[in-house]
Image (cartoon, rainbow, N blue to C red):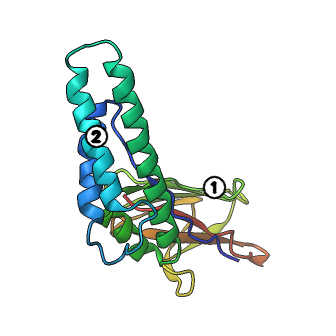
Amino acid sequence: MGVPFYPVVVLKLPRSAKGTLFAARAILNAMRDNPALPSPTVPLDTLEAHIDALAAAEAFCLTRMKGAREARDAKLLVVCGDLDHLRVYVMGVAFQMPAPEAAALVESAGMSLKRVGTRSKGELEVKEGLVSGSVHLVAKALAKTASYEWQYSFDQALWIDLPPTLQADTVVHGLTPATRVFFRYRALLRGGRGDYSQVVSLLVR
């Protein structure tokens, strides 16, 4: 059985209140009237009101009056909470989609998918390649004399063969960035072909 696609959505918020304001408005604008996200868990008018309140508190904070920073930080916490609720909402919608559509949805919301390669207990490791659209596959070497057959897929239904290698690693080029791709391999030993490895996936950069 293959590894299912679990989109991990991240906000990548700046550390500063001013930067968070900019990022929050970008997410607000991206999600407003977005047909793929019709029912945000935080009403966008509410988010906009909280952003405006944070902007006013940030401006007041520049006066350096007593309590201004604490008041600004409280407004900042509210906005960050709103954004995190929306992040979870977007992730839930993306979870119901195939990988390419999910990546496009997350981007349309002004958010990002976490780029992580997963490992299958040493069987197969998937790493980002040196250039965009490339992936480096490293398998567990099974014998001194062996060949390795590699495959990749976008949906775990249709598998595409890659050139076999005599080494326990290969590099795949020409993949579409922001697309989740699934990989597996099997070894050809003197006694015959082994079973395919566990499937490992990576969101191509």
What residue is shown with label 1?
119
Q: Earlier in the sequence, mark 2 or mark 1?
A: 2
Residue 52 x, y percent position in the rendering: 24, 44
Crowd around label 2: few <14 · some 14–19 · many ≥20 (10 Å): some
Q: Is residue 110 visible in this depiction of the protein?
A: no
Comparing 187 with 87, the one in front is 87
Q: Are marks 2 and 1 in contact (CB under 8 Å)?
A: no
Judged from this view, the residue extending furthest toward the right is 191
Name the image quarter holding the N terminus: bottom right
Q: Can you give x and y, in whole percent of width and height, for residue 113 in the image? A: 43, 57
Q: Position of residue 104 (x, y in %)?
A: 34, 70
Number of residue marks: 2
Task: Report the front residue among 26 and 64.
Answer: 64
Residue at 36% over, 76% down: 36
Q: Which residue is mark 2?
A: 53
User: Considering only vertical position in the picture, is 165 above or below 38?
Assistant: above
**What is the secondary structure assignment of the residue under circle 2?**
helix
Depth check, mark 2 against mark 1: the one in front is: 2
Residue 68: horizontal and vertical position, in percent?
Answer: 31, 20
Assign a secondary structure to mark 1.
Answer: loop
Looking at the rendered structure, the kind of residue marked 2 is: Ala
Query: Viewer-proximal residue, 92 or 100?
Result: 92
Taking the spot 30% from the left edge, 59% from the top edge, the residue there is 45
> Residue placed at 46% from the left, 45% from the top?
81
Quadrant, the C terminus:
bottom left
- Which corner quadrant of the image does residue 171 belong to? bottom left
Instruction: Please state which amino acid type lies under the numbered disc 1.
Output: Arg
Q: Is residue 9 left or right of residue 17?
A: right
Identity of the residue furthest to the bottom in this view: 158
Write down the quadrant of residue 185 in the picture.
bottom right
Disc number for residue 45: none
Residue at image coords 75%, 73%: 190
